[in-house]
Image: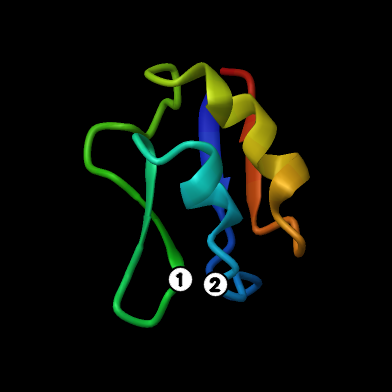
Amino acid sequence: MRITIDRERCIGSGQCVMTAPGVFTQDDEGLVELLPGHENGTSDPDVRHVPATCPVQAVSLSED
């Protein structure tokens, strides 16, 4: 699985971090970032719920 983040679209709501805190964080501006080493998203099963929780669809998943 591949995680794609559209930081231009992100509004900093933090839903991604609340849903999968082991994969996502927020930078100093509140925008979504992946934690190092979690680019493939397989470390946390809750990652699959993140696109649905993001109010602006800034996070998407695709199968490799």
**Considering depth in this image, is 14 or 38 the residue closer to the camera?**
14
Please tell me in which quadrant of the rendered image residue 39 appears: top left
- Residue type at the position of mark 2: Gly
> Pointer 2: what residue?
12
Viewed as shown, does residue 62 lie left or right of 44?
A: right
Categorize mark 1 by other alpha carbons within 10 Å: few (<14), some (14-19), many (20+): some
The C terminus: image quadrant? top right
Q: Position of residue 20 (x, y in %)?
A: 48, 36
Colour style of the rendered protein structure: rainbow
Q: Residues within 10 Å of mark 2 (few under 14, many from 20)?
A: some
Instruction: Give the number of marks.
Output: 2
**What residue is rendered at 60% in x and 68% in y?**
13
| Position of 26 relative to 36 (above/below) | below
**Pointer 2 with pointer 1, Cβ within 8 A:** yes
Quarter placement of the N terminus: top right
Q: Earlier in the sequence, mark 2 or mark 1?
A: 2
- The kind of residue tagged 1 is Leu
Q: Which residue is the extreme one toward the left? A: 36
- Find disc 1 in the rendering and name its residue: 31
Label 2 and label 1: CA atoms lie apart by: 5 Å
Kindly identify the residue that appears in the image at 42 percent across and 75 percent down: 30
Residue at x 53%, y 61% (from the top left corner): 14
Q: Is residue 59 above or below residue 2?
A: below
Q: Secondary structure at mark 2?
A: loop
Residue shown at 60% from the left, 70% from the top:
10
Q: Position of residue 33 (x, y in %)?
A: 38, 57
Residue 37, picture quadrant: top left
Farthest residue to the bottom: give it. 29
Comparing 11 with 7, the one in front is: 11
